[in-house]
């Protein structure tokens, strides 16, 4: 079980990092989501993996640590809210710049300063 | 157990909730309530500072759960100092926002107060996971604040800022998980007790966890390889938001000081002073990078954002010495730099408002309407930021220089800090002389008027440079005591033994 679990976390994290490094906002958002899945599973495993264990010491042979579960729950809620926000921000980026490149319009990267000087503020 | 510890969290929380519900009330009512909240917060932090000044630890345990199991708030001298510094900065930034930034958005005051709440939780908490939650609270409010104002130029920097911080949060969770899996606790006092006792085969895991934590805090504090998001994000925020954000890098600094003196500090057994050598080198490189950025700045706003990075480098270099004197000097410098950088953001915005289309770019423009007043403010701010006598920056940098003990570290610190200050001076004098002294013919049709709140806010923050000098004795006594308290980590462990049931309740 440990090996399969570790491989899943590794795959999720690696895919997440690969996607976060892409240049379009959509893959980046998906990458952040995958990364947070990997992190949540990782956090869950920090209390050690146990099947059929109860979160009360002494009730069963194997003890399931309840604290990582509480941590994961908090992390899921926060991660979900942040993903929602970054989706909205990505949409706004596309609307403002008519392009879903993470740096806005490609043209803008080189002419950022000149453009600002032309238009003033 | 002391219930007053929750005041700096509850006051902005309640004030923020009220702001959400009265979003359509007359703007004067919303402003009055919002400012009243900030003033109350300031009063409560002064009270807490007076409380913490006796050197004892005050604990508040949520739900009366005994410390290693429940979440605790811990007030010590450092937390009280951070709270007061933030509240003073927030008061002036909030005052500045009245009649300017708050007109474009109904959510401004609520977001501003929630940001303060997140900051205050981060400073008060005695639990590593709660610190993560506090970071998220202050970050999500900061995402909203960063987007304030009209125009589309903020979208891309905000996107970068949000994505970077989300990756940072993932790393934070990974490191917290690693530390928990080895020690079985996340309470800072309990961690400090358990880290020296970790078995040798678990140490590498704990070490990796601790170093990832340093990366996360380094991202928040904007240390060199992780600092390039800052100039664009801060440079595009509205002035009061940028001024408040002057304290955001200090949250990273605070977390580094707290975690790497208490948990991975000198008493951490085999993991003592984890990452400290790296920190010193990276801090000096950050300082140098900030100076290069400041020299290359094409507008005043960018110049000040690089000043933020310079101050982060200076602060962490002093912490990287790993001595009590260095920490004390860093805390003194922190007060100076946070307020002055915040004030400079406000002054630069006032200058930009009087220069028409030239705005804050370092080019010649028609003469400003209130040139004398603004130039004096800018001069005072620049002198304090660079560290020339007679203002506070000079004494702060002098303390940092004095705190180095003779050796190779001293050589590096002195040369980079003094050389950096010299080039920063060049950057400021170039910017100031072009903006204020060289003028061209013509006049600005509608200069932004200097209303009373903005004038008070900007000059109040810059005036802190003089106030710090006048109060240098008490302040340096306080920061000395703070550093002594920080390095006496065994006292902090008593947090675990403090009776949590409040008497008489």
Image: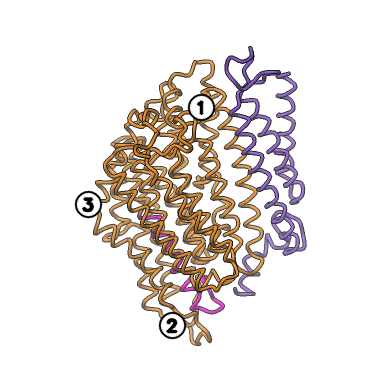
Chain colours: A purple, B orange
SS type, badge 2: loop
Residue B417 relative to residue B139: left or right: left
Query: Crowding at label 1, few (<14), some or many (≥20) Cα neighbours within 10 Å?
Result: many
Asked if the stretch drawn in magenta spans residue B36, the answer is no
> What residue sits right under mark 2 in the picture?
B369
Query: Which chain letter goes with mark 3?
Result: B
Q: Pointer 3 and pointer 1: residues touching (CB < 8 Å)? A: no
One can see residue B87 in this view: yes
Q: Quadrant of residue A76?
A: top right
CA separation in Å, label 1 and label 2: 60 Å
One can see residue A106 in this view: no
Instruction: Out of B98 and B221, give the one closest to the viewer.
Output: B98
> Where in the figure is residue B343, as x and y percent of width and height?
41, 64
Asked if the stretch drawn in magenta spans residue B357, the answer is yes
Q: Looking at the image, which residue is at 69% across and 63% down?
A: A108
> What residue sits right under mark 3 in the picture?
B473
Q: Looking at the image, which residue is at 47% across and 58% down?
A: B244
Q: Are marks 1 and 2 on the same chain?
A: yes
């Amino acid at each position: 079980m440990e090996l399969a679990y570790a491989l899943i976390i590794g795959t999720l994290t690696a895919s997440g990092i690969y996607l976060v490094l892409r240049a379009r906002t959509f893959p980046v958002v998906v990458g952040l989501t995958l990364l947070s899945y990997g992190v949540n599973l990782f956090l869950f495993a920090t209390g050690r993996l146990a099947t059929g264990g109860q979160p009360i010491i002494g009730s069963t042979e194997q003890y399931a640590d309840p604290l990582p579960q509480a941590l994961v729950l908090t992390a899921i809620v926060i991660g979900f809210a942040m993903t929602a926000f970054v989706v909205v921000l990505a949409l706004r980026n596309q609307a403002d710049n008519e392009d879903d490149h993470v740096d806005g319009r490609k043209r803008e990267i080189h002419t950022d300063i000149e453009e600002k000087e032309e238009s003033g503020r | 157990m002391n219930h007053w510890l929750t005041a700096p969290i509850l006051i902005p929380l309640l004030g923020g909730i009220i702001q959400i519900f009265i979003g359509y009330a007359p703007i004067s009512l919303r402003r009055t309530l919002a400012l009243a909240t900030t003033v109350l917060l300031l009063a409560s932090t002064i009270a807490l500072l007076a409380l913490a000044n006796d050197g004892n630890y005050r604990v508040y345990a949520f739900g009366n759960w005994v410390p290693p199991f429940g979440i605790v708030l811990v007030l010590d001298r450092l937390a009280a100092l951070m709270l007061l510094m933030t509240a003073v900065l927030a008061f002036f930034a909030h005052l500045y926002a009245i009649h300017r930034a708050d007109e474009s958005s109904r959510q401004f005051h609520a977001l501003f107060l929630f940001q303060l709440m997140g900051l205050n939780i981060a400073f008060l908490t005695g639990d590593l996971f709660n610190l993560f939650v506090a970071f998220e609270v202050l970050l999500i409010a900061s995402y909203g604040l960063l987007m304030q104002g009209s125009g589309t130029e903020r979208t891309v920097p905000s996107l970068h800022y949000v994505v970077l911080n989300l990756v940072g949060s993932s790393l934070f969770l990974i490191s917290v998980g690693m530390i928990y899996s080895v020690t079985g606790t996340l309470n800072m006092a309990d961690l400090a007790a358990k880290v020296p006792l970790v078995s040798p085969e678990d140490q590498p895991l704990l070490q990796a966890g601790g170093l990832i934590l340093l990366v996360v805090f380094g991202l928040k504090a904007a240390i060199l390889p992780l600092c390039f998001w800052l100039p664009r994000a801060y440079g595009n925020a509205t002035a009061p938001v940028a001024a408040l954000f002057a304290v955001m890098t200090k949250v990273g600094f605070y977390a580094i000081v707290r975690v790497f003196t208490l948990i991975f500090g000198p008493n951490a057994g085999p993991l003592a002073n984890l990452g400290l050598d790296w920190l010193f080198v990276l801090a000096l490189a950050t300082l140098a990078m900030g100076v290069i950025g400041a020299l290359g700045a094409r507008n005043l706003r960018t110049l000040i954002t690089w000043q933020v990075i310079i101050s982060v480098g200076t602060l962490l270099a002093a912490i990287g010495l790993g001595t009590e004197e260095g920490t004390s000097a860093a805390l003194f410098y922190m007060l100076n730099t946070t307020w002055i950088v915040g004030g400079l953001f406000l002054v630069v915005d006032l200058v930009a408002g009087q220069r028409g289309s030239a705005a804050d770019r370092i080019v010649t423009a028609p003469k400003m309407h209130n040139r004398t007043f603004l130039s004096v403010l800018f001069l005072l701010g620049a002198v304090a930021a660079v560290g020339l006598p007679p203002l506070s920056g000079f004494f702060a940098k002098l303390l940092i220089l004095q705190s180095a003990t003779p050796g190779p570290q001293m050589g590096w610190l002195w040369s980079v800090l003094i050389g950096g200050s010299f080039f920063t001076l060049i950057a400021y004098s170039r910017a100031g002389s072009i903006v204020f002294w060289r003028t061209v013919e013509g006049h600005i049709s509608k200069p932004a008027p200097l209303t009373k709140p903005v004038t008070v806010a900007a000059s109040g923050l810059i005036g802190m440079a003089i106030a710090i000098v006048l109060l240098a004795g008490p302040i340096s006594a306080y920061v000395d005591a703070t550093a002594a308290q920080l390095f006496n980590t065994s006292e902090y462990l008593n947090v675990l033994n403090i009776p949590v049931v409040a008497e008489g309740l």
